[in-house]
């Protein structure tokens, strides 16, 4: 056996409350990220991703508190993305209990933040988050600020640069597919995954379990991220693991 | 030491509540996660400490660690008297000792990561960058993978645990390898000798498997 394909549910959090999250279990407080994280920990998620979509940077303490409270009761790896601008932002999250931090807009504006974080805390915790849209066949461009702002930067070149600067993982989200339930942009995922020696997480567009399998077999991803299919209880984490195993992929038992 | 001689009859045997676990604080990123997991595994007397005197009085010692070998080694060495207190307890007083991730790698003779750095030298070998055997093998080794015990050990049971590392421990004496895993070839998952054990995986992030492992460590009588 080798390292398992990771199934990663993602929770969007704004101002310390879940915006898009679980409604398949009876939670005392469905808006509490910690309650939701506990549900996924119990369900055997391989990792959890918190995406902090809080608009202002003044509110950093809120997501740090969410991470700290999550780490007190959840014993699974947690990646936190959104609003990480500096190595000190990363440090605060890691010390609170995050295992990895995902850097997006800041790594576009100031790529050296990636090497800052990798040098201080290790590549293993430095995730470069890449939001891309297709601009012509076989070419994708980086968009920042939740996919709204074009940068003119080639997504493939940016991904390779992130890996060269010391990122330990790439979280590749197709902004074209995000929310469509049409499946990952497999060509985007594969193009990047085949060019780097670090793990790649496929993201954006999952509507069924077949999409998770495709993310690995056709997208060459090492981990598959999804939100709504898990949150709405259509499929459990165990269903996802079973589907991956049935496709002869390595997944947790 | 005085306490150990005078007090034992006052301390219920096998009662975790009465034990002190020194969790070494040298600024490692997984410090609080390990603390939380130890508590969840049943430990109540966890002392998060950078005080060598508290280490000397502890019944068990846990050394966390993530990130770069040299940075962790320097941070540990920067605490006056800490390395000698650890050696006194782990090497000479047979105090149960657990190193996690870089806390395990620090047991090596040396680490080659951003230069060459001396380790504690308790377990012979060198920590080196992992070399992918093929393009399909991604580094860092990130995710859930097997723990395959090499032979019977009280703490190590076969199962799946979470790994997150780009460097690995090449152990000099195969007898010091307690468990292996596989990522494009065999990798050392756990090392140890006598009262010392180190694990490459993260028990604090390995859900039920990890908490059960920590519980066994808390009850371990090597």
Image (cartoon, rainbow, N blue to C red):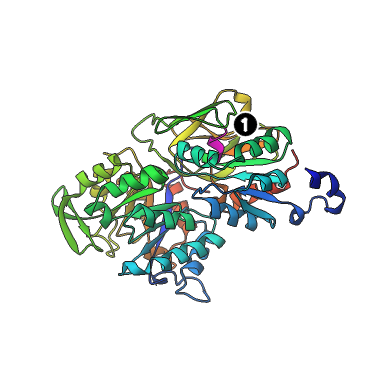
Residue A57 x/y as whole percent? 32, 66
Quick check: can you spot residue A7?
A: yes
From this view, report whether residue B211 is shown above or below residue B121: below
Mark 1 lies on a secondary structure that is loop
Q: Main secondary structure of the magenta part?
A: helix
Residue A222 placement (x, y as % from top left): 38, 45
The residue shown at (78%, 54%) is B15
Left or right of residue A26: residue A119: left
Q: Residue at x 37, y 50 (%)?
A: A213
Most extreme residue toward the top is B173
Q: Which residue is mark 1?
A: B150
Nearer to us in this view, A87 or A225: A87
Q: Residue at x 37, y 42 (%)?
A: A119
| Magenta highlight on residue A74 | no
The segment highlighted magenta reads B103-107
Q: Is residue A126 left or right of residue B119?
A: left
Chain letter behind tag 1: B
Q: Is residue A188 above or below residue B117?
A: below
Picture quadrant where residue B84 is located: top right
View extreme (bottom): residue: A28
What is the tally of numbered marks visible in this picture?
Answer: 1
Where residue A252 appears, as percent x and y from the top left, is: 50, 48
């Amino acid at each position: 056996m080798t390292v398992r394909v990771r199934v990663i549910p993602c929770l969007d959090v704004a101002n310390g409350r879940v915006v898009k999250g679980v409604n398949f279990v009876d939670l005392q407080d469905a808006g509490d990220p910690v309650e939701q994280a506990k549900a996924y920990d119990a369900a055997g998620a391989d990792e959890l991703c918190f995406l902090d979509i809080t608009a202002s940077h003044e509110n950093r303490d809120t997501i740090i508190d969410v991470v700290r409270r999550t780490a007190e009761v959840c014993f699974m790896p947690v990646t936190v993305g959104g609003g990480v601008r500096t190595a000190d932002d990363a440090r605060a999250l890691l010390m609170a209990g995050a295992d990895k931090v995902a850097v997006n807009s800041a790594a576009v504006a100031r790529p050296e933040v990636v090497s800052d974080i990798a040098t201080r805390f290790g590549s293993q915790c430095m995730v470069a988050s890449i939001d891309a849209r297709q601009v012509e066949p076989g070419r994708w461009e980086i968009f920042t600020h939740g996919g709204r702002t074009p940068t003119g930067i080639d997504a493939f070149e940016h991904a390779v640069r992130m890996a060269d600067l010391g990122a330990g993982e790439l979280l590749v989200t197709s902004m074209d597919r995000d929310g469509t339930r049409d499946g990952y942009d497999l060509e985007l995922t594969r193009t990047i995954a085949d060019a780097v020696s670090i793990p790649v997480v496929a993201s954006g567009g999952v509507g069924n379990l077949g999409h998770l399998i495709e993310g690995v077999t056709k997208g060459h991803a090492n981990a598959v991220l999804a939100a709504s299919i898990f949150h709405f209880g259509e499929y459990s984490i165990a269903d996802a693991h079973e589907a991956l195993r049935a496709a002869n992929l390595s997944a947790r038992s | 030491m005085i306490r150990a001689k005078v007090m034992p009859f006052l301390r219920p045997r096998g009662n975790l509540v009465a034990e002190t676990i020194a969790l070494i604080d040298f600024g490692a990123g997984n410090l609080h996660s390990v603390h939380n997991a130890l508590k969840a595994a049943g430990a109540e007397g966890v002392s998060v400490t950078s005080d060598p005197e508290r280490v000397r009085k502890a019944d068990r010692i846990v050394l966390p660690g993530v990130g770069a070998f040299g940075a962790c080694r320097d941070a540990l060495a920067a605490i006056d008297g800490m390395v000698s207190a650890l050696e006194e307890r782990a090497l000479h007083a047979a105090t149960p000792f657990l190193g996690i991730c870089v806390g395990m790698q620090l047991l090596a003779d040396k680490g080659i990561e951003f230069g060459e750095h001396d380790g504690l030298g308790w377990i012979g070998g060198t920590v080196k960058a992992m070399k992918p055997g093929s393009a399909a093998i991604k580094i860092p080794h990130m995710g859930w993978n097997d723990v395959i015990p090499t032979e019977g050990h009280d703490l190590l049971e076969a199962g799946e645990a979470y790994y997150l590392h780009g460097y690995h421990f090449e152990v000099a004496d195969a007898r010091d390898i307690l468990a292996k895993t596989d990522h494009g070839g065999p990798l050392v998952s756990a090392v140890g000798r006598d009262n010392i054990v180190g694990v490459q995986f993260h028990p604090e992030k390995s859900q039920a498997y990890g908490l059960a492992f920590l519980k066994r460590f808390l009850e371990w009588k090597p």
